[in-house]
Image (cartoon, rainbow, N blue to C red):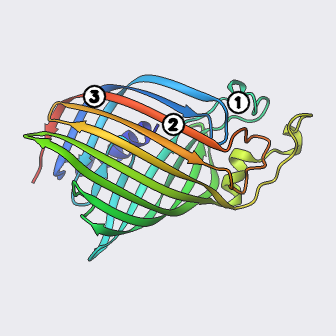
């Protein structure tokens, strides 16, 4: 879901690649099933060939899911900046949003303050808790709209469970509680007077609690191959926008699996 954002960030930062401690490039195929948006009863299934990018240095980490820049450290406290993205949704393909404006690509960027109970940002084994704040922008690549902020606390555990020579298997679990501004919530769940129908009433959402999520990922990694999969559960039963006519269910599930062949590996100084 976030591959395009990862690639864009890498290209913007290509002058820094020469100083990378590790850079891997490859190509693969990824299959994923994602809800159109949280609360939607409809899913999109994607099977796509996509580039594989993994870049790690003392100041930055870019992988399949996100781009993270390490800004500051004091003992176990770390201040990072991260970026993520979500796919656009064509409203004609979604029954609840039929006749409404499309949902554009949404890119999010902002800082996160982490406390590491074990390990460090680039450790194979780590346990951390943090708080993130991200600015959200929606774009169809012809214009950009400010759609507010998303924020919340989270906890993440990463464990190396098997290693043999250059082959590893790792597990990552993450839980987060999300909050959002009214502008962000309105972009996804607001219904204006011109968009209301007999079966879809007007709705003006408020800011506040926007649900929780729990994810589990497993990755096999070697010098030439990467295989990974994830499952992610969203609970939005008590979200402030749960009464929007665009919300059709209070639970969502997303999952995916991918295979990539790495054709380029380099380690810098």
Q: Mark 3 or mark 1, which is nearer the start of the sequence?
A: 1
To which residue does mark 1 refer?
91
Q: Residue at x 12, y 46 (%)?
A: 267
The residue lying at 69 percent from left, 55 percent from top is 238
Q: CA distance from mark 1 to mark 3?
A: 32 Å
Local crowd at mark 2 within 10 Å, few (<14), some, or many (≥20)? some
Tell me where residue 33 appears, x and y as whole percent.
Answer: 51, 30
Residue 260 tag number: 3
> Is disc 3 surrounded by few (<14), some (14 to 19) or many (20+) residues within 10 Å?
many
Residue closest to the eye, 19 or 40: 40
Towards the viewer: 260 or 266:
260
**Could you tell which of marks 3 and 2 lies nearer the N-terminus?**
2
Q: Secondary structure at mark 1?
A: helix
Where residue 136 sits: x, y (%)? 57, 53
From the image, state whether disc 1 or disc 3 is nearer to you.
3
Query: Which of the pair 192/131 is nearer the observer?
Result: 131
Q: Secondary structure at mark 2?
A: strand
Q: Say which label, 2 or 1, has the lower sequence index.
A: 1
Give me the residue at 39% from left, 47% from top. 66
Q: Where is mark 2, residue-wise?
A: 254
| Picture coordinates of residue 252, whole percent (x, y) | 59, 40
Q: Is residue 192 left or right of residue 97?
A: right
Check disc 1: other Cα within 10 Å, few if <14, some if 14-19, many if 20+. Answer: some
Q: What is the spatial separation of the Cα atoms under label 3 and label 2, in whole angstroms?
A: 20 Å
Looking at this view, name the residue that lies furthest to the front.
161
Asked whether the residues under the numbered discs 3 and 2 touch, taking CB atoms below 8 Å apart as contact, a structural biologist would say no
Picture coordinates of residue 262 (x, y %)? Answer: 21, 30
């Amino acid at each position: 879901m976030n591959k395009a954002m990862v690639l864009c960030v890498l290209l913007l930062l290509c002058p820094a690649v020469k100083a990378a401690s590790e850079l891997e490039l490859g190509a693969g195929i990824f299959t994923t099933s994602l809800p159109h948006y949280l609360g939607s009863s409809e899913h999109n299934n994607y099977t796509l060939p996509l580039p594989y990018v993994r870049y790690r240095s003392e100041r930055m980490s870019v992988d399949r899911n996100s781009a993270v820049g390490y800004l500051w450290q004091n003992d176990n406290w770390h201040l990072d900046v991260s970026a993520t993205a979500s796919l656009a949704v064509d409203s004609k393909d979604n029954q609840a949003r039929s006749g409404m404006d499309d949902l554009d690509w949404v890119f999010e960027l902002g800082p996160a303050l982490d406390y590491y109970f074990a390990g460090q940002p680039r450790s194979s084994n780590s346990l951390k808790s943090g708080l993130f704040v991200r600015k959200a922008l929606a774009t169809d690549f012809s214009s950009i709209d400010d759609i507010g902020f998303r924020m919340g606390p989270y906890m993440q555990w990463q464990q190396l469970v098997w290693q043999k020579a250059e082959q590893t298997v790792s597990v990552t679990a993450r839980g987060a509680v999300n909050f959002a501004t009214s502008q962000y919530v309105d972009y996804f769940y607001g219904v204006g007077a011109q968009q209301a129908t007999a079966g879809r009433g007007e709705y003006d959402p408020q800011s506040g609690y926007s649900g929780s999520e729990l994810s589990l990922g497993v990755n096999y990694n070697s010098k030439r191959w990467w295989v990974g999969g994830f499952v992610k559960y969203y609970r939005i039963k008590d979200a402030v926008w749960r009464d929007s006519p665009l919300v059709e269910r209070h639970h969502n599930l997303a999952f995916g699996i991918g295979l990539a062949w790495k054709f380029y590996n380099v380690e810098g100084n």
